[in-house]
Amino acid sequence: MANTNISRNITRRSFGALALGSFGALALAACGSSNSSSTSGASAGASVSSKPAPSALPGGMGTTVADGVFPRTVKHFKGETTIESEPKKIVVISTGQVDDVLALGVVPVGVADAKEADGVPAYLKTKYADKAAELDAITKVGKRTAPSIEAITNLKPDLILINSTAKDAAIYESLGKVAPVVVTEGQGLNWKQDFLLIAHAMGAVQKAEQLLKDYEASAKKLGEMANAQGKTFSFLYASADRTRIFAKSSFTGSITTDAGLDRPASQQVAKTSVDISAEQLDQADADYLFYAVQSGDNSKLTGEALWSTLKAVSENHAYAVDADAFYMNAGITAAQVVVEEIAKVLK
């Protein structure tokens, strides 16, 4: 059972996280067992961050304990947590974390769903088809914005993962009473460091580092292929109430930076995304356009008056893609999917 003496630290740390959190972030954060004060989240709007995607943990984060050795104390974005044994029953709350846990070889026992999406996206079910029965057996533990403490407790997890973009400070203490909790930073741009932090908690850092090296090699090959053709690449996403072009400081933007892909001038901005109106659809144009609609009804974009005027459309270089992999999640598997899908259309 996790240490329950965490109230004061969590409340103080949570206020700082809220002050530093991204615009419109809805995912929750939590703090784990044996917490103490320390150094203090998927793309969700027009962030003004201009930093490149961090590829290493901030100083002091994680653990110095070797892979496979437990107990281990992991410093994270809400303090530090002691994990007594190798996690086998992991509950995942926040965006992208299911992706990372699966990549490290563990099927979570519980997952929180997004507002309008399954907690285990289709691209993960495809990539990990060999684990179909286990994926189907995952227990739903409420929504990411309101996880069910009762459902989580019933699973008797040995690790809970959540990110730091909290809306409700009370959830931190509640989860901390159930099991050790490790808190990643969240936000799509931070996907690499968050993956590494999860690996530190699971005792699988070497595996995570190798997966990142494999991704970087794939991104480099993609860049060489694209640059030889001298093409530009655009990324467009529409949800119920807004249409956005994804810019440099986003998950997808970080991948294009790693690959060295050329972007239209409208997307060379230090933001997560830029909202556009139907009359501004030309700002999404490029040699290649990768688009998705949250509802799956692509006519929300393809039915617009300006759609047929786009160069990418007229040259048959506009491609509908998986919204979860490209725009809604941020994990190592999604990154590989994005690279693979772009490479596929260039061949």
Image (spheres, helix red, strand yellow):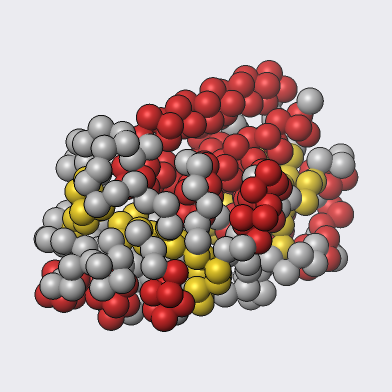
Q: Position of residue 76 (x, y in %)?
A: 25, 53
Residue at position x 72%, y 22% in the image? 229
Q: Is residue 242 above or below residue 124?
A: below
Using the image as rendered, state which of residue 257 and residue 184 is in the foreground.
Answer: 184
Question: Residue 243 sits in which quadrant?
Answer: bottom right
Q: How many marks?
A: 0
Whether residue 60 is visible: yes
Residue at position x 68%, y 34% in the image? 340
Using the image as rendered, state which of residue 67 and residue 233 is in the foreground.
Answer: 67
Q: Position of residue 316 (x, y in %)?
A: 87, 42
Q: Position of residue 234 (x, y in %)?
A: 66, 45
Q: Is residue 91 above or below residue 51?
A: below
- Side (left or right) of 232 relative to 96: right
Question: Residue 119 sits in which quadrant?
Answer: bottom right
Whether residue 279 is visible: no
Residue at position x 61%, y 55% in the image? 134
Using the image as rendered, state which of residue 333 and residue 3 is in the foreground.
Answer: 3
Q: Quadrant of the C terminus?
A: top right
Q: Quadrant of the N terminus?
A: bottom left
Q: Position of residue 284 (x, y in %)?
A: 68, 51
Using the image as rendered, state which of residue 69 and residue 319 is in the foreground.
Answer: 69
Residue at position x 35%, y 58% in the image? 159
